[in-house]
Structure formats: C-alpha cells, structure tokens
C-alpha cells in the first residue's frame, strides 16, 4: 500500500509538489508565529522579572504593559505592604534610541534592587546628576559603543559610564538612566511605568498579587509571562492571529488537498474501479486515497516546518524587534505545525475517500475505457 | 499454484437497466464447474453487463445469480466475496502504469492482506506461469500488448479464483497475439480446473468454449446457443 501511495504521488510529481508547497506555506506561517509567540513569552518573562523581581505592578486595563502609567508615590506604600520585601519603580522609554528602535531605556532608582542587580563589566557607575548612562552589553555590542562613548536618547546626549550584564534579554539589550533623568527626558515627572517587587520570605505570588490589586485599585499585578502576554495587546493579537491562521490553513489546505485528490480520483477511475474489481474493499481503496492525502500533507508540513524555522527569524527581523524578541522554536511548536499538516491531509482526504467508497466498479471501468 | 475446483454459475431470469436503458432482459444461463462459456453478441448487446453481474460488480434488478450457491452482490462484503471466487481479465489490460509487472500481479494480494514476501513469491510464480518471468520488473509501458494482457491474466489468477471472467480479452490484440492469449487462458482453465466465462465476438473463442450464447439487445437468442464441445 505504501509503495502504491508513493508511486502515485511521484507519477504526478508537479501536482504533488505544488499541493505540498501550499500546505508548507500555511504550516510555515503557523510555526513562525508560534516561535515568535514563544519568543515573546520568554521576553515577557524578562519583563515580569526585571531586576530579578517576583512580580510587576502595572496600570490596569492598558493595551500594552509598557504604556502603563503609575504615580511614583505608589512605591513607598507598596514597600510598606507585608507581602513586599523590596519595591522599586521603573520608567520604560521605548523607541528612545534612534540607532536601535527596539532597545528599551530603563529609568531606574539608583538605590533600587533593579540597579543594584546590574553587574558592571566595563567602566563605572554613573556620577550622581551627571548626564551619564549605563549600557547593556548586547546593546553595546550591536551599537559598537564602548564605555566612554556617547549615546543619544530622544535627541539628548549621554556619556556611557559603563557596560553591564544582567542575564535578562530586555535589560542587556537596553540602557539604564537614573529615574529622575528619565522622567525629565520624557516630561513625566512623578510618573513611572511600573513598580517591580521582590516578595517577602514566605509570601506567595498569587495571593500577594490579589492583595496588592485589592489594596491599590487601578493596578494590575503580573506574576507570570502568560499573564504579561494576555495583558499586552500585542501578545493577545499574535495569539489570536495564530489561531486565525491555523483555521485558515486548515480550511485552505484541506480544500487544496480535497481538490487535488478529487481530480486524482476522476483521472484514476479506471484504476480505482480495477482495485475494487480485484477485491479491494471500499475501505481499503478509501484508505489509499486518504493515505495519499495525508502523505502529501506530511510532505508539505515537513517543508513548512523548515520554512517556519527560517521564517520565524525573518519575521522578527521584519518587525524590527530582534533586540528583545528571539524566535524560540520548541518541539511542541513544531509538533503543532505537523499536527496541522496531518489534519489538513485527513480533512482534505475525507471527501474524496468517501466518494471512492460510493464509486461503482463497472461505471468506473467504463469511464476508464471511454 | 494449487489446483482449484471450478465454480458453478447459475444465472436465472436476470434483468438489468441503467436508467431507461434496458441492458438485459430475463437472461438465464448455467455453467458447470470447469466449463468454458463464451458470450457473443454485438456491441451494446449487454455482454459486459452480464459479465459484471456474474462477477458481482453490479446487482441485478430482477432474477438471481449464484456462484457456488452464493449471491456475491448480496454478501455483506461483496469485495471480499469477489476476491475469494472471481478473477477478471479485461479487453484493455488495465495495468497500473507506475507499477512493475510483478507489482501489478501483487495488487489483488494486497487487497487480500497477503504478506509481502508471500505476495512476491506468488506473483513471480504466476508470471512464470504466463511466460513472463523475465519481464517481472518491467513497467507496462515496456511491455507489448500481448505481454501486458498476459500480466493481466496472471493478476486475475493471483487469488486462485474458481471462476475466471474475461471481457473481450483479445479485443485489442492482433490475431497472432490473440491466439497466444487464448491458448494461455484455455490451458490455464484445463490445468487449474476453473470455470471460464469469456465475452468475445471472436469466433476462435466460441470454437474453444464448451458452450456459446449470443446476446441480442439484452436477451439470449435461444436459437443461437451452441454446444461446441461435448
């Protein structure tokens, strides 16, 4: 049976290749978006755990966590909460660097645990009040900017006092200014984006989050990356886009396979009638057709997985977010792509296979004889 | 190849219509085990329809067809019943073009769920039987018309049928090749003891058959039933 399936697909190689290619494009889009989403999730984990925090407090109901606005007076009140060991404010400046639009500039309290957690690998800490900035090692490498160099943020020039490494992609791909300088730079005195929190010993993130949200109305506490993705409009949109593309791929791919297989059975009526004549059961003949549909889909899916892995990188590059989103290909992401491919084959093969079971051998043979 | 016992074929008052076209009307015939029956008649007289009905490819509108007491078309699994009893040879060999001669002979055995090694062994043995052992790995496009038809005969014999139905098996062949194919069919009938029903307008077939019936407009011309051999 397998040999017959292979032979049938090979003898109509152009049709097989084009059908498989169509499926490959659909599967590639799914895999690319899944790897992008996974990358975003990992990035979101970095956003949630900035500076080694356990949770982040953001403004409630914002389209994107980076667009959150909170008063910096909240920090003291949060720090006084029994669940909280340390709290430090952050002001995130996005698209502040002309040279790298995806890099984030963090306005951070010099005494806070966020700044204290940065490991200087070159240079020195910025001087108090001086127009100086710390640069993440990834950003320093990409901009080829050593300590002592000059960095322009929103048109203002800052000397690079030192280069740091934190191990968190977001931070290492960005720069750190003092909170006061950052607030002055963007004209938002007294405002911060979020407050990152380290919990007191024994405090549980979920229950602490509930208490904080209850005590500080208008805030939302993000404790895990999934939550961050849900809170952010981008993450939600991408998740929905993946779902829509999966459905579109299934529909278009299935129609494509059904069309190919229907054409194939019309052309091969004589052959299929013959199989029935020589004693193949309708189920076995249908299995042959279904098998061919699945084989062409798996072929397409395999190509799609490869294209998807390449496409994930291209997508990140095209969106200009390569600095803080690295596409992450997981076995489950690939597995889902493959599952979609197989599902396309099964769905697309069902109708032609059913038609074959309804085929009357004599009619089929007569059609073949012309 | 094992010696099979021929099947008894009984066709009683069978009628068949396709839409408003009446293909057969109250046709009856009987073929004893191991007998060779030739069905003659003009194009459109219902020969192929009768053969398809005997082989269980279609069901009659009226009357009954029994092969060794079984009505194939009434069986819960007609394909399986067909596989167990009947082998078909057609005017055009209908070989699968992408498969070798050996693989074509194996096709009915795949349907029967025969193991791969056994399929291969039986296919090669059958090809040897029809004189094509040396052409086992050739594609149909590399075979002559007569060779292709002999492969089709080998395929029809793959499941060791007790009834061989041949629909104008020499219709697309020249006279010399036709003779060889007929020689093969009747030799195998003699060797294996199966019942043979051949649709053909070729008088050479009638001459070799035990009995010839002639169909005219879907009915048997009773004046034209001939017993060729006693």
Image: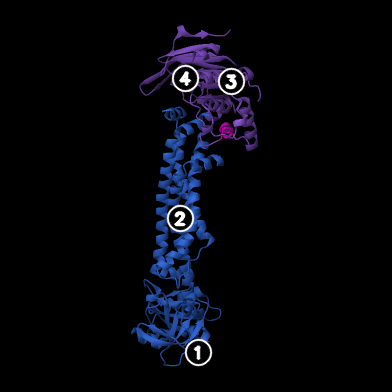
**Cα–Cα gap, marks 4 and 1:** 100 Å
Q: Colour of chain A?
A: blue
Q: Earlier in the sequence, mark 1 or mark 2?
A: 2
Q: Residue at x 35, y 82 (%)?
A: A154
Colouring convention used in this rendered image of the protein: by chain
Can you identify the residue that label 2 sits on? A27
The disc numbered 3 marks a residue on which chain? Answer: B
Can you identify the residue that label 4 sits on? B50
Can you identify the residue that label 1 sits on? A124
Q: Earlier in the sequence, mark 3 or mark 4?
A: 4
Contact between marks 4 and 2 (CB within 8 A): the answer is: no
Can you identify the residue that label 3 sits on? B184
Start-end of magenta stretch: B100-106
| B21 or A14: nearer the viewer | A14
The disc numbered 2 marks a residue on which chain? Answer: A
Q: Position of residue A320 (x, y in %)?
A: 40, 70
Give the quadrant of residue A75. bottom left
Q: Which chain is purple?
A: B
Which element carries disc 4, helix, strand or loop? helix
**Vertically, is A219 above or below A330?**
below
């Amino acid at each position: 049976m397998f040999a017959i399936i292979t032979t049938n697909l090979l003898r109509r190689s152009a049709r097989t290749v084009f059908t498989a290619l169509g499926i490959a494009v659909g599967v590639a889009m799914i895999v690319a978006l899944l790897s992008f989403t996974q990358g975003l999730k990992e990035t979101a984990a970095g956003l949630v755990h900035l500076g080694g925090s356990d949770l982040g407090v953001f403004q409630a109901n914002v389209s994107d966590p980076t667009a959150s606005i909170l008063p910096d007076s909240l920090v003291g009140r949060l720090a006084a909460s029994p669940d909280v060991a340390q709290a430090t404010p952050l002001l995130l400046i996005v698209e502040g660097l002309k040279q790298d639009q995806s890099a984030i500039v963090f306005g951070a309290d010099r005494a806070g645990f966020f700044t204290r957690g940065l490991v200087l690998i070159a240079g020195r800490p910025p001087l108090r009040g001086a127009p100086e900035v710390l640069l993440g090692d990834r950003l320093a490498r990409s901009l080829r900017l050593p300590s002592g160099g000059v960095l322009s943020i929103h048109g203002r020039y800052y000397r690079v006092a030192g280069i740091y490494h934190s191990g968190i992609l977001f931070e290492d791909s960005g720069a750190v200014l003092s909170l006061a300088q950052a607030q002055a730079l963007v004209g938002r005195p007294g405002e911060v984006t979020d407050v990152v929190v380290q919990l007191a010993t024994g405090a549980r993130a979920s229950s602490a989050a509930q208490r904080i949200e209850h005590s500080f109305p208008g805030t939302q506490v993000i404790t895990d990356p999934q939550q961050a993705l849900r809170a952010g409009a981008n993450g939600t949109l991408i998740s929905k886009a993946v779902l829509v593309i999966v459905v579109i791929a299934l529909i278009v791919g299935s129609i494509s396979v059904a069309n190919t297989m229907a054409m194939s059975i019309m052309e091969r009526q004589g052959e299929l009638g013959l199989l029935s004549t020589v004693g193949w059961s309708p189920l076995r003949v249908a299995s042959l057709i279904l098998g061919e549909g699945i084989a062409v889909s798996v072929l397409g899916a395999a190509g799609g997985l490869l294209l998807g892995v390449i496409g994930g990188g291209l997508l990140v590059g095209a969106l200009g977010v390569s600095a803080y989103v690295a596409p992450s290909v997981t076995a489950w992401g690939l597995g889902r792509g493959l599952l979609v491919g197989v599902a396309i084959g099964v769905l697309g093969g069902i109708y032609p296979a059913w038609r074959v079971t309804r085929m009357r051998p004599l009619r089929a043979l007569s059609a073949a004889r012309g | 190849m094992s010696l099979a016992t021929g099947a008894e074929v009984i066709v009683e008052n069978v009628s068949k219509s396709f839409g408003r076209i009446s293909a057969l009307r109250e046709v009856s015939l009987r073929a004893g085990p191991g007998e060779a029956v030739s069905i003659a008649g003009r194009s459109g007289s219902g020969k192929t329809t009768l053969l398809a009905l005997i082989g269980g490819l279609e069901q009659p509108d009226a009357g009954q067809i029994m092969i060794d007491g079984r009505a194939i078309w009434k069986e819960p699994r007609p394909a399986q019943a067909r596989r167990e009893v009947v082998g078909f040879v057609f005017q055009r060999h209908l070989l699968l073009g992408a498969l070798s001669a050996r693989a074509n002979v194996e096709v009915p055995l795949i349907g029967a769920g025969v193991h791969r090694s056994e399929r291969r062994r039986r296919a090669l043995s059958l090809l040897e039987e029809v004189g094509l052992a040396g052409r086992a790995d050739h594609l149909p496009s590399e075979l002559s018309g007569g060779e292709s038809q002999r492969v089709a005969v080998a395929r029809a014999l793959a499941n060791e049928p007790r009834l061989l139905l041949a629909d104008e098996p020499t219709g697309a062949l020249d006279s010399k090749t036709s003779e060889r194919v007929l020689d093969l069919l009747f030799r195998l009938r003699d060797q294996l003891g199966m019942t043979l029903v051949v649709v053909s307008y070729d008088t050479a077939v009638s001459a070799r058959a035990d009995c010839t019936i002639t169909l005219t407009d879907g009915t048997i011309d009773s004046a034209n039933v001939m017993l060729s051999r006693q």
